[in-house]
Amino acid sequence: MTDRTDPADSTLKAAFLRHEETLAPPGHALGEDDSAVYRTLLESTKAIPWKIDWATMTFSYIGPQIEALLGWAPSTWKTVHDWADRMHPDDREAVVNFCVAQSQAGTDHEADYRALTRDGG
């Protein structure tokens, strides 16, 4: 994610990684014995970790830092439509189509787009 010192620079770099087991130490599943460590790690970054159930298109987790970074409370992110609606309209169609297709195919990917803040910025 870019540093937001320049208000004109509102590009959000998003990395979409489906392989959660890559975060776990060898011999452990993610969340096994070390869930508090990984949760602290994920929630102390300037990134916004999330988990979505692609079958229902609903979020099961949004990192709390979304509120500090974009002004949105995590509880307001219910579905993939909330994500799409909070993206700059000029970026929306291409990014959503790409990310949904890649995620449903199980492919790790990245996308750059302009995220809208709660105050409309």
Image (cartoon, grey):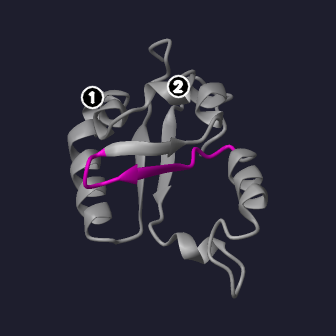
Side (left or right) of 84 relative to 28: left
Q: In the image shown, does 121 or 63 lie closer to the viewer?
A: 63
For image coordinates 45% across by 24% down, the residue present is: 76
Side (left or right) of 110 relative to 21: left
Q: Give neighbour class at mark 2: few <14, some 14-19, many 20+ (Cα, 10 Å).
A: few
Query: For residue 109, what is the image quadrant?
Result: bottom left
For image coordinates 26% across by 63% down, the residue present is: 104
Q: Mark 1 points at which residue?
A: 89
**Compared to 43, does 79 lie above or below?**
above
Q: How much space separates mark 1 and mark 2, taking CA atoms?
A: 16 Å
Q: Badges 1 and 2: C-beta atoms under 8 Å apart?
A: no
Side (left or right) of 87 relative to 76: left
For image coordinates 32% across by 62% down, the residue present is: 103
Magenta stretch prevailing secondary structure:
loop
Side (left or right) of 99 relative to 49: left
Mark 1 element type: helix
Q: Please provide percent x and percent y for residue 33.
A: 75, 69
**Compared to 80, does 103 lie above or below?**
below
Q: Name the residue under label 2.
A: 8
Q: What amino acid does circle 2 point to?
A: Ala
Report the magenta residues as a range.
46-57
Query: For residue 69, what is the image quadrant?
Result: top right
Q: What amino acid does circle 1 point to?
A: Pro
